[in-house]
Amino acid sequence: MTNSTDMRWWYVPMEIVMLRRWLVAAFLINVLLLTVDYLRAESDLLLLGIVSCLLFAALRASLPDVSDHVRRNISLVLSAILLGIAVYRLLRTELTVFNIWIHCWSLIPSGLTLFWLSGRPVTVWTSRKLSDSAIEYGLMRNAALAKKFHATSTHITLLHFVAITVIPLIWIIDIAFSEGNALGGQIGDSFTTEHFSKILNGDSFWTWLTNSLIVSIGTALLGLFIAIPAGYAFSRYKFTGRDVSMFSFLLVQMFPGIIILVPYFLVMKTLGLLNSHLGLILAYCVTALPLCVWMLKGFFDTIPRELEEAAALDGCNQFQVFTKVVLPLSTPAIAVTALFSFLAAWNEFLLALTFNTSNDMYTLPVGLASLISSTGQAWGDFAAASLLVSLPVALLFLFFQKFLIDGLSAGGVKG
């Protein structure tokens, strides 16, 4: 049997293994969170935050090795100091969901370190010589805990990313249902639907919604009408200028849209398309078309040519092959492309603001921006309208979820 003295050097309790990883993540995240204290101009809390980051680095460096109870004791002291600083910083700030979430990145790692380092497995590992049977038991224990710790750390990480996404949404919902137009205040301190009533009972919102629906649906339909045959042609045929055209599609995506604003405006003015739905539809189609063609071309490439050849042998002409074989297989890609075109037009602000000077032709982004002016800020109305505008987008994603999933695995021969 292997000598226990040799075995001890590669047996490490799972608690120490996880702390060596998690404390690095805690240090990096706390360094990023220093920006919050800096933006709040709270110099004392910022100084404590810097001290906490340094203590996290020192704690990671002081984690014990085999038979090193001195380093364990140092780590215990550092983790206790960190926990105290974290509690003090939390009590110094307003107890909001956001502040609690921020300080959890100090409270939980320091508290967990203190708990694990004072536990029996680490205490025994650092204070005495282990027998072969104890080491074997420790290795089996590590194997049993590894999956649980990995799953826990994964879920904690995902929950924090969810929090980053959900907290702004909760804030907007609170403003929309709160009295007045203030951005501050406690979450849930008041409740009213006056902002939604004001938006829904007004004529402007419905005018903006109608304009956005016309422009977005028109952009999606016209974009598909052009992008589908174009993507299929680039995928299946070799012709002069094919590679140059595909490269030009990529090239135009490198330039910001604002550089074509003036030429667009001059063209639309010359054609008499300012303050019109058709002008915006044409502008949005030109902007979104290169990416739509590339998306569809890439999907058409995954469809086996043998399917088209088999259909041709059965007597189908080229148009029938395209409509009866290629298009049905391409439904997921077409749905995703339509969704992209729709959202590009639904969310666009700059062109809609430039081409439309009349309130009757405003789309939703421009209309919402008009609620916030230099003379007054209707934040409650703005938040309520923002939620209403987001509903169609959320419903579209729910409806197209199946197509988004199918688009990852569609293509290929079944059987």
Image (tube, rainbow, N blue to C red):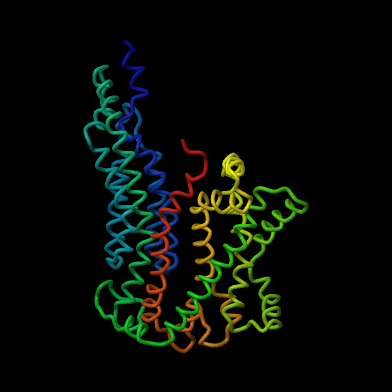
- Residue at 37% over, 58% down: 48
Indicate left or right for 291 with 15 as reference.
right
- For this orientation, the residue located farthest to the front is 315
- Residue at 31% over, 55% down: 104
Total of numbered circles in the picture?
0
- Residue at 47% over, 89% down: 375
With respect to residue 100, does 211 lie above or below? below
- For this orientation, the residue located farthest to the left is 120
- Residue at 67% over, 84% down: 272
With respect to residue 82, does 364 lie above or below? below
Q: In which image quadrant can residue 90 be found?
A: bottom left
Q: How far from the left and from the top, in percent, is residue 346?
A: 50, 71
- For this orientation, the residue located farthest to the bottom is 375
Observer-nearest of 125 and 43: 125
Indicate left or right for 90 with 209 as reference.
left
Q: How far from the left and from the top, in percent, is residue 139?
A: 29, 25
- For this orientation, the residue located farthest to the right is 240
Q: In which image quadrant can residue 176 be found?
A: bottom left
Observer-nearest of 375 and 110: 375
Q: How far from the left and from the top, in percent, is residue 401?
A: 41, 55
* Quadrant where the N terminus is found in the figure: top left
Indicate left or right for 393 with 76 as reference.
right
Q: How far from the left and from the top, in percent, is residue 349?
A: 54, 74
Observer-nearest of 153 and 392: 392
